[in-house]
Each structure stands twice: as structure tokens, then as C-alpha cells.
Amino acid sequence: MISSQMLKGTLEGCVLAIIGKGEAYGYEISEQLGEYGFGKVAEGTIYPLLLRLEKNQLIQATFRESEVGPRRKYYSITQEGKKEFKRFLESYMELSGAVSSLLDDVKGDLINE
Amino acid sequence: MNKQTKQLMKENNDLSFHLKAADNKILTDMVVYIRGADISGYQQELVRRDITQMILDGEQRGDTMEDIIGSDYKIFCDNVLREVPHLTRAEKAVSFLGTLCVALAVLLAVRLLFGLSDMFGDTPTWPYIPVTTGAIISMVILLCSVLLLYNTITRNSFNISSQNNKRIPVLFAAIILACICADFFLKTVILSVHISIVLIAILLLLIIYKITDTIN
């Protein structure tokens, strides 16, 4: 299970990635995160994040009637959101490379102890 | 409250009727908590709408509140409130002014009713309403107590235990008793105000309240 601290730094970028694939609503986003291996992410965890992304104009929301039940808020990525995702991707790749390099170096030592 | 907020509030009230009773209770606790935050009435209703729709959708899937919102409702609300535009100092001041005006208008109206009953006393002062030190003190006590009570209830909406549930009415009764005692024992008349002045004051206060409510 991924710790919440690790998730905190990357969840926003990952949510942008999912919305960047195609318009989605809150529960759909949390389901997709689960399918990608993030574990069970409650819609309540996603909602404040979506508010922040919308406030920063990285995504925009529209209401659609759903087949059953109430209207749903669908989110789509904006041009600014695409730029922000690109920045996240670059940062994450750099971090991922650095962490992998460090862990490859120390992994053997720690396992052998 | 402007038309837009009133309309949204009505839609939210209608939506919440469709919730299961247990889920509606938790939503109510969240809404009470949100009502105490420094955000506009409209923002409160926007957040309320989103959360209600989230819960309704979750109920359709057979999810529990914990599945939908998470395990800690207070943390959820705090995270949401962090992302919502807060009132500026000026807006907070306007909102407080509106609340104060409507509270004062109500208190003055009650004073007026008591003043009317004075007509039948031993020494009627009609059409003047005597303003005593006790009356002023009791009004101040009531105003402060109501504001404090509102803050306490909204800040603690998730942990109002059964103990606190009994404490609040007892506290309120003690406050009312203090006001009655102040009124009864402190009878020094500071000034006498003509009833028309009181009526004009009430009207002015309500107008100010209406203006501040429309702005917010």
C-alpha cells in the first residue's frame, strides 16, 4: 500500500494525467487511480484536489445529466493544465531517476545486512 | 442572501431529501461545520451541492459514507475549505455587520413588546420606552452568548457528544436567567426613547441587514 505522504506529492499530477486522457467525473477518476495500482482512493480525497485544480484553472467543470441518479460534474483539462502536467512529468521523471539511482546503489547493502 | 444563493439552497434542500437518513445526518454535520467557515453563503451551497451529489451517487453504487468521503469527515471538510475562496476582511466585516443588525433588530422588537406591556403597569411611560442599565446589559449578554453559541456549535458539529448536548441547553437557560436578573434588578433608567424612534431604528437595522445580505 502506497503511504499517504508519498501519494500527496504526486496525486495532483496523476489526476491531471487521468483527466488529460479524457473528460471524467470524480468517482471515475478514483476508480481509474485504483486500476493503475494506487489502491483505494476515496472520492472524498479527490474532491478537494479537483477544487484546487479548478481554482488554478488547470481543469474546467461542466454538469451533465447521468443515466441514473443526480447530475454529475465532469472535468476536462485546460491548456494551462496540459502545460502544468508537462512540468509535473518532467519533475517526476527527474525525481524518479534520482531515487532509482540511489536505491539501486544502497539496495544491495541493506538487503545483505 | 442573494437570489442565486437562495435558488441553490432550495435545490440542495430538495437533493438532500433523497439521501438515506444516516447519510443525511453526517452531511448535516458537515454542512454545520462549513457554515462556521469564512466563506460566502454561495460558496457554502456550491460545496454542499457537490458533496450531496457525491453521496447520492455513492448510495446508488451501494457505497458507505466512509467509502465515499473517507474515514475522517472533519479532515475532509478542512481540506475542502482550504481550496475554496475565503471572505476578505471587508466581506467578513460586512457579514458580521449584517448579523449584528438583524440580532439587534430582533432584540429591540422584543424590548418594544415589553415596553408595550409597561402601558398597563403602575407607572406607565407610554409612548416612551425606558432604557435601563439592566436592559442594555442583558442585550449585550444575549448578543455575545448567541455569537459564542453559534461558533461553538459549528466548530464542534462532529463531536457534539451527548454530554455537550445536555450542556448547551443548560448554558442557554443560565444565560436567559442572567438576562432576566439584570433586567429585573438593574432598573436605573439611562434614557427614555419614543416608540417611533425604536420603530425607525428597527427598520433601519433591517434595511442594513438586507443590504449586507444582498452584497454577500
Image (cartoon, helix red, strand yellow):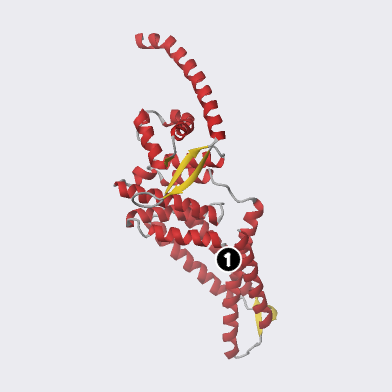
The answer to whether any part of residue B188 appears in the image is no
Query: What chain is tagged by disc 1?
Result: B
In the rendered view, tell whether residue B135 sits above or below residue B212.
below
Foreground of the two, B189 or B8:
B8
In the rendered view, tell whether residue A33 sits above or below residue B58.
above
Q: Residue at x 39, y 37 (%)?
A: A30
Q: Residue at x 52, y 29 (%)?
A: A85
* In this rendering, position of residue B5 left or right of residue B53: right
Foreground of the two, B191 or B97:
B97
Foreground of the two, A28 or A49:
A28
Where residue B73 appears, as percent x and y from the top left, is 41, 46
Q: Which residue is mark 1?
A: B143
Q: Quadrant of the C terminus of chain A?
A: top left
- Type of the residue with mark 1: Leu
Using the rendered view, name the quadrant where residue B202 is placed.
bottom right
Where residue A38 appears, as percent x and y from the top left, is 38, 30
Q: Residue at x 49, y 20 (%)?
A: A93
In the rendered view, tell whether residue A68 sits above or below residue B117.
above
Q: Quadrant of the N terminus of chain A?
A: top left
Using the rendered view, name the quadrant where residue A80 is placed.
top right
Q: How many marks?
A: 1
Q: Residue furthest right?
A: B191
Q: Secondary structure at mark 1?
A: helix
* In this rendering, position of residue A76 left or right of residue B117: left
In the rendered view, tell whether residue A96 sits above or below residue A25.
above
Mark 1 burial class by Cα count in 10 Å: few <14, some 14-19, many 20+: some
* In this rendering, position of residue A79 left or right of residue B94: left
